Image: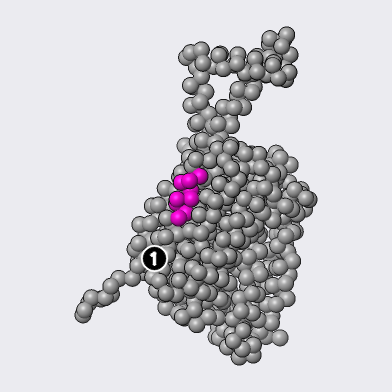
Amino acid sequence: MRPATAEGLAERHGPAYRWYVTGTVMLGCISMVLSATIVNVALPDIMGEFGMGQDKAQWLSTAFLAAMTATMLTTAWMLAVFGACASYIGALVLFISGALLGAVSPDDDVLILARTLQGAAAGVVQPLSMVVIFRSFPPARRGTAMGIFGVGVILAPALGPALGGFMIDEYSWRAVFTLAVPPCLAGILLAPIFLPGREGSGPAPAFDGPGFVLISAAIAAFLTALGGGQRLGWDSAFVEGGFGLALACGAAFVRRELRTAHPILALGLYRNPRFVAASVVAFILGLGLYGSTYLVPLFVQTVQGYTATASGLLLMPAGMVLGVVFPLAGRLSDRVAPHWLILTGLLLFGVSSLLMVDADTSTDFWVFAGWVVVGRVGLGFILPSLNVGALRVLDHALLSQGAGAINFMRQLGGAVGVSVLAIWLERQTTRDAAALNDLQTGGHAAADTLDQIALLLGQAGLVDNINTAVRTDEAYRYFSSMISAQASVLGFRESFLLVALIFFAALIPAWFMRARRQRPGGPT
């Protein structure tokens, strides 16, 4: 049976229809955004089982986000050709397939493939959900609508690590892949009831296949080169070739989109300076959201020794606070100029990251949780205001393209952010370890410290006091672990500082999102 139109469904179900359709698409949206970050708490377990290094482990997040970024640009075409119902169901089926493959992965390469399939499906569902919800609410309540949409985009990553940590500690890391399957199945059952089919009966628009291939190749080449730089050297032929290929594909993509009649990304959107400013903010929002959700669980597990459950629970208070912030932020964005809320949110998140610069092995659980809350409140103010501010400046015909483009920029920021922060963390940790080792040379400080450690180990009965060689070796091993731990703390601190500086820099483009005042007799 052909799905009904949006108007027909609204007439059939009455005023409550907008809530039915919102609940239906949010089932998939929340599940997929949750899956984007829930694997982060499982990284130590996955790395241990497959013997993965940090450079390859970050691809579990990057592959998801990269695939998600590329397929977001197909949403407008899929809505025009297949309609919301068929597109949504197809994406959920692909996502479930990736989830089941991840749960039974025999090695790390299959696991990365599974994450890629999941990301490709999530890239369709996020902007689709945004468009469907935006169109279901009247203009005066679209800020509220974007606040609801924000629950799926930010609340899920806040709560996901807690659920994932529990699943890992009680079962295994494979269990986290099955967590999103039941709500996705519910979404498949509800979609034919509440989601509209294809709008219009004219010929389907052509798909910009070459454009999609070019932008996908550009993203893949850039992220691959970025991930290989630290391991192979930034001046290696592979890395330089990767960046060159990314640049060439990116330039070819821009040329293609300017010439084709049916672009996958309408570059005309970027003639609007306010939309450009919103896109820059969206990029940085993605970087902060996914980058911090990558760094925080990794810090508390590797530096502070938290279990997966405890690291997930650290983010739980922030999720609870967001449940209060989102409705407030959505309503405020209907009444207050969006750029003011975005500026407030960016400032709060920057302050949150700046507070984390003081984190160390003894930082109290609730202190760290409070720092995370400050940042998540900031994100809660940013998202509904950003979506409303970006889409309000576009014509109705460009809503699908605009929604895809703004989500594309946020996810691209997430993919780049996870890679850049992983590289920065590894680079700074290595540099700090070398600097700390250098401080121990050229004097008697190291020898005196080793003697003190050996004496303490002997007094504690941990080494043989008679065998001097064994006692010295154990003291040296313990001393090396101290330096490594301190270097790791410093590396994380410098990574949190980088996030803070980037968010403070984002205040500049956010200011340019404001509407220009009208001059008498002049343009706006």
x and y percentages locating residue 140 in the rendered image: 46, 80
Reply above or below: 279 against 454. Answer: below
| Quadrant into which the N terminus falls | bottom right
Outermost residue, left side: 521
Say which residue appears at 58% left-offset and 72% top-offset: 129
Q: Residue at x 42, y 63 (%)?
A: 342
**Coloration mode:** one colour
Closest to the observer, 339 or 407: 339
Is residue 378 found inside the magenta-colored segment of the image?
A: no
Image quadrant where residue 459 sits: top right
Residue in the picture at 73% in, 64% down: 181
Where does the image place residue 73, in percent across and percent down from the top left?
53, 66
Secondary element at image label 1: helix
Asked whether residue 17 is in view, the answer is: yes
Name the residue that disc number 1 marks.
Answer: 339
Q: Is residue 145 above or below residue 463?
A: below
The count of marks equals: 1
Q: Quadrant of residue 341?
A: bottom left
- Visible residue check, residue 230: no
* Residue nearer the viewer, 524 or 261: 524
Q: Majority secondary structure of the magenta segment?
A: helix
Amino acid type of the residue tagged 1 in the rendering: His
The C terminus - image quarter: bottom left
Q: Is residue 351 magenta?
A: yes
In-front residue for pair 110/335: 335
Residue 407 position, x and y percent, is 51, 64
**For the point 52% across and 23% down, which residue is it?**
437
Badge 1 crowding class, 10 Å Cα cut-off, few under 14, some 14 to 19, many 20 or more, is many
Magenta residues span 348-356
